[in-house]
Amino acid sequence: MNGTMSDTSEVSVPTLAPWLVRVPAIFEGILPEILASVGAVSTKRLGQEYCWIRTPTPDAIRDSGGGIFVRWNLPIEHAWPCQPAKIEGFIEKAAQTLKTKFGDRAPQGVFVGPLHPTSPDRYFRHLAANLRGRLVLLFPGLPAKTVEEQEPDRETLFVLVGKEGLYAGMATPRSANGFYPGGSRYIAQHEPDTISRAGAKIAEALHYLRLHRPPLAAGSHWLELGACPGGMTSELLARGQRVTAIDRAPLDPRLAGKAGLTFVHDDVARFVPPAGLSYDALLDDMNGPPEESIAQVIRLSRFLKEGGLVVFTLKLPRIESIGEPLALLRETIDTAGRSGLRLTAKTHLTYNRHEFTLFFERC
């Protein structure tokens, strides 16, 4: 019997998962490289910093080296590309659709934010607030009525709205990398009370850290390296923390005599704590070569209590590709790890520029 045999074997085609990722505008110049590193096959820009991507490897968004450049991420389980301002009854239509789609999945909370969070146009901020108000009525008995009440490992329904439409999905705050829709907690700063923008940076860092560990108790003792002019110092004191601040330059005069503050007017490299003294946390936001900064952190970390916290700002060189920052990040984490500091979390905060915030614990 003559004939030909046809190949009936099936070719496996990977499923492309739709995902929303937020890459800070400061990394715009290397955005294509970042998206490629997290497995993006196709990309559509949304809002100021968001991209709707499709990827066969969504885990890469959170686990790959390039994932550190992604501030926040969300699986897109419902998308309504539209112009909300032109749709009559948009809020009710959106709310009912979300209730139908997600109502039986018992989210711990429902939070809505704008795709353009820093836009001076307040329309979508009001739209987000009104939509959340309606959703709260449709999802009665939510355990997390406020952002702060969320559990890091329990799923939340997150929704973003903007001129490009509505995008929603469920994720745990920890997997999404933030408690807020979009991942940012914007800290209002008003002169003359604000000493520096660094105060907002540590406030956001401590809020973010709640994704990974309980907050420090009131009265905890911080060792702050390179504290001048005192923006972070002021924020920590306002939270009922004690601070030993070290800097060659003087602190802002408004901090003089503040309860809980000890100021050491000296070079960090020469500082040695008094005998028998230990700290609950160490904070480093010093400028200069990161290799020198992490060396001082390691030297002084032996004065931390076991399980003590380190908040370290990794200052980056000029960013022209993802390779050099990732190499510096890995080197810093490895150096700290060999010295008994275990990495707890790492991220790019809203108030970071060319820098990452790393969190360690003393083993």
Image: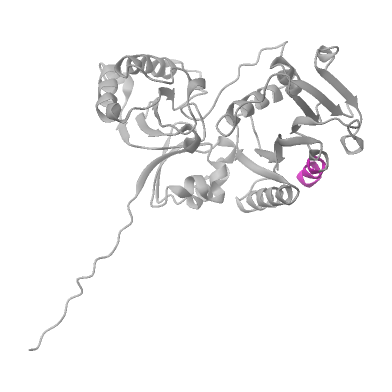
Task: Choose top left, top right, bottom left or bottom right for residue 272.
Answer: top right
Which of the pair 208/129 is nearer the observer? 208
The residue lying at 51 percent from left, 31 percent from top is 178
Where residue 355 sits: x, y (%)?
Answer: 67, 39
- Looking at the figure, which quarter contains the C terminus? top right
Q: Is residue 194 above or below residue 324?
A: above
Question: In the image, 89: left or right of 307?
Answer: left
Where residue 238 sits: x, y (%)?
Answer: 71, 15
Can residue 317 be seen here? The reply is no
User: What predominant SS class does the magenta segment belong to?
Assistant: helix
Q: Which residues are magenta?
A: 289-298
Question: In the image, 138: left or right of 263?
Answer: left
- Looking at the figure, which quarter contains the N terminus? bottom left
The residue lying at 31 percent from left, 34 percent from top is 78
Which of the pair 8/360 is nearer the observer? 360
Which of the pair 144/38 is nearer the observer? 144
Q: Residue 204: within the magenta?
A: no
Q: Is residue 141 above or below residue 288?
A: above
Which of the pair 181/144 is nearer the observer? 144
The residue lying at 54 percent from left, 27 percent from top is 184
